[in-house]
Amino acid sequence: MTETHELICIACPVGCRVKAITQGDKIVSIEGNQCKRGEVYVKDEIFRPTRVVTGTVRVRGGALPVLPVKTEEPVPKPSIPAILKEWSQLVVTAPIQFHQVIVADVAGTGVAAIASRPLSKQKADNKTA
């Protein structure tokens, strides 16, 4: 049984509209891509879609209450809900450095979650009672 996929390629700035026809786990035809990178992108997007995931985690003792984080590399798209659930339950302690590893193996993907910005400790309040 054949299946038709219509995608906009993001492998380069051109943004080609690509049409791919698959049969089982093989691509029968690809048309519309203007470069070889488009062919590779379409194959990966159809059979092994991945994404860099971004989100936030809570911070204890930080200048801000949350820290932006992201996966260090793209992860399989089906792993995204588990990653977001793990992050929703996580609390880190300030200070945090830029690109510091927050979770070494997020949701069992083998990919690290890293800080997207530095975050200092909350400054002590200098008020006298």
Image (cartoon, helix red, strand yellow):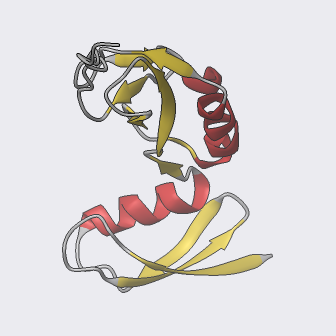
The answer to whether residue 55 is left or right of residue 118 is right
Q: Quadrant of residue 96?
A: top left
Q: Which percent across, then down, holds residue 113?
A: 44, 26
User: x%, y% of residue 83?
Assistant: 61, 35
Tell me if residue 43 comes above or below residue 109 in the rendering. below
Outermost residue on the front side: it is 129
Res 68 seen here: yes
Residue 46 occupies quadrant: bottom right
Question: Does the rendering let one see residue 109?
Answer: no
Residue 45 lies, in percent from the top left, at 51, 60
Tally of numbered tags:
0
Q: Quadrant of residue 116?
A: top left
* Quadrant placement of the C terminus: top left
Above-or-below relation of 116 to 20: above
Viewer-nearest residue: 120 or 82: 120
The spot of residue 4 in percent (x, y) is: 64, 82
Among all residues in the image, which is located at the extreme right?
1
Q: Residue at x 47, y 14 (%)?
A: 104
**Where is the N terminus found, in terms of image quarters?**
bottom right
Q: Residue furthest left?
A: 13
What residue is rendered at 48% in x and 17% in y?
92
The answer to whether 71 is drawn above or below residue 17 in the figure is above
Q: Is 78 drawn above or below residue 46 in the view shown?
A: above
Q: State the residue in front, 25 or 105.
A: 105
Q: Nearer the viewer, residue 31 or 90?
A: 90
Residue 92 placement, left or right of 107: left
Q: Is residue 53 left or right of residue 32?
A: right
Residue at left offset 38%, top offset 35%: 73
Judging depth in this view, the residue of 101 and 90 nearest the camera is 90
